[in-house]
Image (cartoon, grey):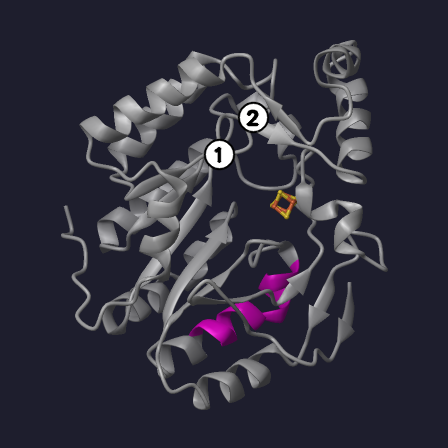
């Protein structure tokens, strides 16, 4: 990793604020969009750029804000990589968000988030906290191939349940769904059942598929060659150089998602989920504990 002094930390878009404390990621997901060329990394993706002045920048930004809002983090790199345990920058930023009584929508795949559960609870009590967890692959062995350097789906489901016990609402990112790999009714069904069990507020999916672009595509195809011999050829025959790679089962899987969500009163339209994560009502009703 290497350290930089960033010029700013908070970005504003669509009524919400976002921040990324780190740049790059070490979780090693074979399908990672963040490593695409369009993001113009000037350092290797795994050589994490640490915005060492993130807490100071955040505090200055929140101090000068007239209106409280939800602050999103984790969309471009996970706030709970290994280095966070040593650096504690995510934790420091959460303390500032708590102290200034802003809301938080934090996204991760890592169980290291449990270290900060005390802060998440406090933020949820004072304002609002939404925890977003990505679940793609129920089978442990397959999960360890697709997302090799982070805890598996079973463990992530435990995180969701812990949040449920604490009354902290959760959103699940059921994405990406990789054609010919995890795009089965069995896989998606098992994840949906777990979401119901953990009382998640909503599930985000963009049509049961994968997107690939320059940089990300090469990395993904190399991983296919290593772990799924012959599959790259099938991808190229099926999708060519397309940006969007919908699963051949997308219709059936989307119907299943809608059915399970409607039956269990969970949000399933991405816009509804995003709106929920951007809203910081004056009087926020916390979820009941059970
Ligand atoms: S956790 Fe997200 S940013 Fe990190 S490697 Fe996986 S997909 Fe990429």
How far from the left and from the top, in percent, is residue 70? 38, 67
How far from the left and from the top, in percent, is residue 44? 84, 53
Q: Nearer the viewer, residue 80 or 274?
A: 274
Up/down of 106 relative to 222, above or below: below
Up/down of 24 relative to 242, above or below: below
Can you say which quadrant of the picture contains the C terminus?
A: top left
- Marks 2 & 1, CB-CB < 8 Å contact: yes
**Quadrant observed for ligand 1 in the rendered image:** top right
Q: Secondary structure at mark 1?
A: loop
- Judging by the rendered image, the residue that carries numbered circle 2 is 209
Left or right: 158 in relation to 248: left
- Judging by the rendered image, the residue that carries numbered circle 1 is 206
Residue at figure coordinates x 56%, y 53% from the top left: 75
Q: CA distance from mark 2 to mark 1?
A: 7 Å
Residue at figure coordinates x 70%, y 33% from the top left: 212
How far from the left and from the top, in percent, is residue 177? 54, 26
Specify the label residue 254 is tagged with. none
Q: Which residues are magenta?
A: 83-94
């Amino acid at each position: 990793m290497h350290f930089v002094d960033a010029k700013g930390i908070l970005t504003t878009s669509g009524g919400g604020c976002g921040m990324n404390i780190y740049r790059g990621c070490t979780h090693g997901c074979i399908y990672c969009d963040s490593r695409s060329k369009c993001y113009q990394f000037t350092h290797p993706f795994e050589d994490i750029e640490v915005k060492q002045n993130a807490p100071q920048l955040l505090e200055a930004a929140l101090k000068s804000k007239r209106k409280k809002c939800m602050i999103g983090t984790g969309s471009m790199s996970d706030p709970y990589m290994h280095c966070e345990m040593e650096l504690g920058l995510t934790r420091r930023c959460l303390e500032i968000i708590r102290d200034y009584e802003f809301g938080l929508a934090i996204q991760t795949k890592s169980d290291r988030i449990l270290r900060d559960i005390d802060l998440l609870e406090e933020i949820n009590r004072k304002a609002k906290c939404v925890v977003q967890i990505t679940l793609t692959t129920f089978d442990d062995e397959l999960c360890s191939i697709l997302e090799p350097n982070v805890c598996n789906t079973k463990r992530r489901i435990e995180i969701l349940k812990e949040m449920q016990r604490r009354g902290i609402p959760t959103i699940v990112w059921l994405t990406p769904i990789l054609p010919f790999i995890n795009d089965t009714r069995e896989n998606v069904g098992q994840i949906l059942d777990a979401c119901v069990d953990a009382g998640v507020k909503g599930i985000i999916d963009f049509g049961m598929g994968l997107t690939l672009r320059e940089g990300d595509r090469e990395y993904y195809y190399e991983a296919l060659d290593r772990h799924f011999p012959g599959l790259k050829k099938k991808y190229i025959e099926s999708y060519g150089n397309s940006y969007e790679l919908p699963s051949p089962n997308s219709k059936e899987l989307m119907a299943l998602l809608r059915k399970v969500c409607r039956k269990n009163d969970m949000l399933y339209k991405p816009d509804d989920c995003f709106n929920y994560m951007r809203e910081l009502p004056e009087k926020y009703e916390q979820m009941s504990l059970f």
